[in-house]
Image: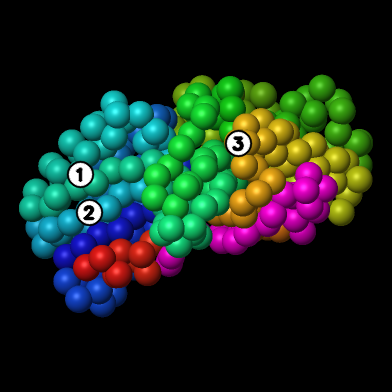
Amino acid sequence: MILIVDSGATKSDWIALDDKGNQLFLTQTLGLSPEVLTREVIEDRLANNFELSKNKDAVTRLFFYGAGCGTDRMKKFLKEIFEEFFPNAKTDVKEDTYAAVYSTTKIGNQGIICILGTGSNCSYYDGHQLFQKVTSLGYILMDDGSGNFFGRKLLRDYYFHKMPQALGIKFAQEFNLEADHIKEHLYKQPNPNTYLAKFARFMIENKEHPYCKGVIDKGLQQFVNNYIMQFELATKVPINFVGSISHFLREELTAVIERNDLILGVIRRRPIEGLMEFHTQTI
């Protein structure tokens, strides 16, 4: 049995295939980012999934693409956990950018590959190899244009009284905005980046409001400036996207891309289906 996993900070999509490429089952766990989770939490999330626990001895190959797997230390950390949980499996752990590449760009084609979901990232693919100019320092310092980036912006503007009053009242009606509650989730609970990203839903649902329009436009432009434009070929190759923010803000993202004389490529909400197509070709 082959397992293919696309793991974001919020959730992980799993597909199991037999040795002929036929789909055996689909399942989902919470996100498994090693940057923000302990070994115990990751092990619990694996063990609490019925399909994974039932089939763990049958797995012979695991292809894991995950947020937070950009360094060798994090890859090794996860690989050790997986090899203990799936004792008969040979395991490959790669950062989630590779999932974005394999699901949007054919081998041999060039492109800039962007992730805009709970977190954000950007790489250049020359048709065979992946190149990054900037190493991500995680959600606190980077992740421009991501769900947690926008969530942080909304909370700050609400507390600094920069959000329009009527919109702020509506915001407070949808979420618990008590300071102690927010700080509990940011500093004591797991997945603070996922917690922040939940607030982006409010922005998307109210994206026609002038305030939200401005936040979205500035955030996406900041992503273009800091991530995409670092590559010299930025205006000459397609810019492909995966992730919920790029999916739900497709129109706004398209406008920003065109304004910067960039070439919009594929926008895909989840890369898991493209990953399955990629790996079935190599079985």
Residue drawn at point x = 54 percent, y = 34 percent? 193
Residue drawn at point x = 51 percent, y = 41 percent? 123
Location of residue 95 by image quarter: top left
Asked if residue 263 lies in the magenta stretch, the reply is: yes
Q: Which residues are magenta?
A: 251-274
Above or below, 159 relative to 106: above
Q: Nearer the viewer, residue 68 or 258?
A: 258
**C-alpha span from label 3 to label 2:** 32 Å
Q: Mark 3 vs mark 2: which is more N-terminal?
A: 2
Q: Name which residue type carries label 1.
A: Phe
Q: Mark 3 vs mark 1: which is more N-terminal?
A: 1
Residue drawn at point x = 18 percent, y = 36 percent? 80
Q: Name which residue type carries label 3.
A: Phe
Disc 2 marks which residue? 62
Q: Nearer the viewer, residue 120 or 173?
A: 120
Disc 1 marks which residue? 82
Q: Position of residue 120 (x, y in %)?
A: 56, 39
Q: Nearer the viewer, mark 3 or mark 2?
A: 3
Location of residue 215 by image quarter: top right
**C-alpha span from label 2 to label 1:** 8 Å
Mark 2 in CB contact with mark 1 (< 8 angstroms)? yes
Q: Nearer the viewer, mark 2 or mark 1?
A: 2
